[in-house]
Image (cartoon, rainbow, N blue to C red):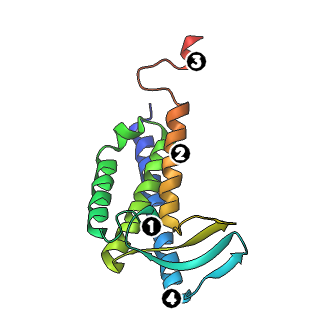
Amino acid sequence: MQSEKALRHLVTRCAMLSGLILIIDQITKVIVENNISSSIKVIPGLFNLVFVKNTGAAWGILAGKGWLLLLISIIVFILIVTFIRRITEGWPERYYSMALIAGGIAGNSIDRIWRGSVVDFLDFHYGLHHWPAFNVADSAICVGVFIFIISSWIRPQPGTETPRSRQ
């Protein structure tokens, strides 16, 4: 296990990562709001920059229920902060995954509070397949969840022996 000092440094780095995600997310959204009025083809047939106001969650789920999504986000954020040690089980990459998720939650929550909807602008498509537009906060949440899942698959569960302890 990590010393308390090392854990404090890890938590500090994670808080900084969350703050950085929040700042980058909000800056990119301001830039999009002020500069994009129609679709900009970045990679024709694959990637565009757009300006979309999303009143729901992914794929427009719960559209118009921003207050409910905000409430869920606040609850999840509080749970992450409150139970971070238990959730991460001491694995550093899980702390970073929670930092990414928390930063993403904060970014989209600010949108729901101040803008009334979430600003999405990254638009990927290929042929007839089109992915709903998303943003930096959404990306951070997805990457954080992915890291957490991979870590859960490869790290031993608490109370189980590790491969080294069997030798």
Name the side, left or right, on which 8 lies relative to 64.
Answer: right
Q: Where's the N terminus, which quadrant?
A: top left
Q: Where's the C terminus, which quadrant?
A: top right
Which of the two marks, 3 or 1, is nearer to us in this view?
Answer: 1
Read off the residue under disc 2. 147
- Determine the residue located farthest toward the top in the rendered image: 167
**Secondary structure of the residue carrying numbered label 1:** helix
Q: What is the spatial separation of the Cα atoms under label 3 and label 1, in whole angstroms?
A: 39 Å
Q: What is the spatial separation of the Cα atoms under label 2 and label 1, in whole angstroms?
A: 19 Å
- Residue 22 is labelled as 1
Q: What is the spatial separation of the Cα atoms under label 4 and label 3, in whole angstroms?
A: 55 Å
Mark before the other along the chain sequence, 4 or 3: 4
Q: Amino acid at mark 1?
A: Leu
Measuring from the top left, give residue 127's x and y in whole percent.
70, 66
CB under 8 Å between discs 4 and 2: no
Read off the residue under disc 4. 34
Residue 95 in which image quadrant: top left
Which of the two marks, 3 or 2, is nearer to us in this view?
Answer: 2
Measuring from the top left, give residue 32's x and y in whole percent.
53, 82
- Residue at the image position 43 percent from the left and 49 percent from the top: 98
- Residue 164 is labelled as 3
